[in-house]
Image: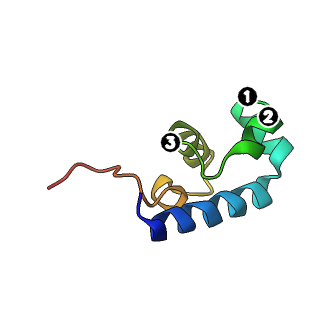
Amino acid sequence: MTNNNKTLAEKRKQEIVNKYGGKNLSKMLGISHPAVSKWKVVPPFRAYQIAKLGDFKIEYIRPDLRISPIR
């Protein structure tokens, strides 16, 4: 992860937690609130789950992940 993408991913994590609330997000994902609090960035699988909620695209949540195949 490049430093720029890491910083962006950290900001996006905070934006997502602010939108849903840490406790609400943890309930939606079926995990503990302390687990969410420990994230520096949203883990890849959790990014997928959050994207399925419909408010954010996975590419927005984790700009450092390669989601589509290389062409």
Say whether marks 2 and 1 touch (CB < 8 Å).
yes
Question: Is the residue marked by circle 2 packed among few (<14), some (14-19), or many (20+) residues within 10 Å?
Answer: few
Cβ atoms at labels 2 and 3 below 8 Å apart: no
Q: Which quadrant of the view contains residue 23?
A: top right
Which residue is at 64% across, 52% downward?
Answer: 40
Spatial CA span between label 2 and label 3: 18 Å
Task: Kindly identify which residue carries mark 3.
Answer: 44
Nearer the camera: disc 2 or disc 3:
3
Q: Secondary structure at mark 1?
A: loop
Measured as percent of width and height from the top left, residue 52 is found at 56, 43
Outermost residue toward the front? 3
Q: Residue at 71% across / 61% down in the picture?
A: 14
Q: Nearer the viewer, residue 13 or 49?
A: 13
User: In the picture shown, does residue 30 fall above or below 54?
Assistant: above
In-image side of 55 versus 48 (left or right)? right
What is the CA distance from the residue labelled 1 to the residue labelled 3? 16 Å
Q: Which residue is mark 2?
A: 27
Q: Quadrant of the N terminus?
A: bottom left
Give the residue type that dot 2 points to.
Lys
- Residue 53 image-quadrant placement: top right
Give the colouring mode of the picture.
Answer: rainbow
Q: Amino acid at mark 1?
A: Gly
For this orientation, the residue located farthest to the bottom is 4
What residue is pinned by disc 1?
A: 30
Q: Which comes sooner in the sequence, label 2 or label 3?
A: 2
**On screen, 44 above or below 15?**
above
Q: Label 3 is placed on what type of residue?
A: Pro
Return the x and y of residue 15 as percentages of the image width and height.
70, 64
Label 2 vs label 1: CA separation? 5 Å
Ranked by sequence position, the earlier of labels 1 and 3 is 1
Q: Who's the residue at 75% across and 55% down the image? A: 17
Q: Residue at x 35, y 49 (%)?
A: 67
